[in-house]
Amino acid sequence: MKKNIAVVMGGYSSEYLISLKSGTAVCENLDSDKYAIYPIHIFKNRWILIINEKEYAINKHDFSVIIDNQKIKFDCVFNAIHGSPGEDGKLVSYFELLEIPHTSAPSYQMALTFNKRDCLSVLKPYGIKMATSYLLNKGDSIDENKIANKVGLPCFVKANKAGSSFGISKVYKKEHLMAAIEHSFKEDDEIIIESFLEGTEVSVGVITYKNEVIVLPITEIVSENDFFDYDAKYHGKSQEITPARLSEKEKKRTQDVAKQVYEILKMKGFTRSEYILIDGEPHLIEINTVPGITNESILPQQAKVAGICLKDLFGDMIESAINNQT
């Protein structure tokens, strides 16, 4: 008998369109002989299952759906929601309360890694290298001189809890800081301002596959734009070179740090982390716990180089979630 798999996509953030593409890719690559696949769109005003362009309302009390007078419940949820509520722990907490297996890390880990500054503060005592940062909450007094003196120029101004480069600016002049800060506050009420790190940018996928933590082949990011922004990520304005053009020493050091970060944070499922290599030493930028998973996305590219097809990767995620449910 086929297992019922809910593939949740959409979400409440600016990343919802990207999430819909990721969720569709999951549905297309899951083994339909093994799974009954249900694409579920999660938005603030409605949770709906869409089959053959027909919509069915999701019952939020038990995450079920009625189709042809038959109640459908799910053996597992594949989480493909970038941003809130899929990547910040909220939706995962709901599934945990309902005791429905899901493909993400536990809710606490999701919430921690979604908050860039909290995540970096947890990792810092372990010696993980990172940029110098300055933190602001909405309503704080803003001293451009103090910011520039601490992080230097150029610097990056980022929304603290956002992805896909929404709410991020690279600032070269002190007088442009305020506009960048206001831009970031449109995405979040917390922002993080970081020093510019000049070096080789790499993206590292770390996954649990067949019950083993695996570091996938590293991807080198070469952006045509000033940095790896939304346009570079999604409109082909970058080169994504897998495997990255690193020395064996750089490769091993980056793999070791990426695996260490994954294990310190007690992650599960798949993650993709961004690093800047300076003199062979990786500096952590951020961690994505629901990275893009379309056929063109970085983590699937890495899995392909590692000899893992998406059908096997996604299927293993589901089986691991079901088998490890406590």
Image (tube, grey):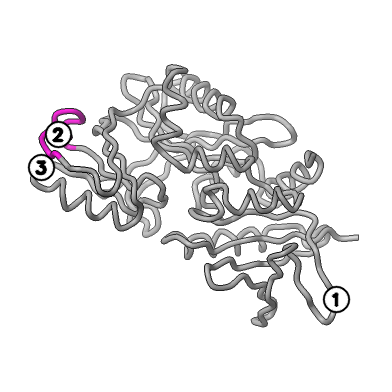
Say whether residue 66 is left or right of residue 201.
right
Q: Residue at x 18, y 43 (%)?
A: 141
Q: Residue 148 carries which label?
A: 2
Name the residue: 48% across, 61% down. 18
The question of residue 140 being in magenta is answered with no
Q: Is residue 213 above or below residue 319?
A: above
Give the residue at x 52% y 68%: 44
Q: Kindly identify which numbered label has been placed on residue 173.
A: 3
Q: Where is residue 127 in the image (x, y as percent from the top left)?
A: 43, 17
Quadrant of the image containing the N terminus: bottom right
Q: Position of residue 275 (x, y in %)?
A: 40, 32
Q: Earlier in the sequence, mark 2 or mark 3?
A: 2
**Is mark 3 in CB contact (under 8 Å) with mark 1?**
no
Q: Residue at x 17, y 42 (%)?
A: 142
Out of 273 and 108, give the one closest to the viewer: 108
The crowding category of the residue bearing disc 2, from other C-alpha atoms within 10 Å (few below 14, some 14 to 19, many at least 20), is some
Q: Which badge, 3 or 1, comes first in the chain's sequence? A: 1
Taking depth in this image into account, of 7 and 74 the one nearest to the observer is: 74
Residue 251 drawn at (x, y percent): 47, 24
Q: Residue under circle 1?
A: 70
Q: In terms of depth relative to the viewer, which is nearer, 231 or 174?
A: 174
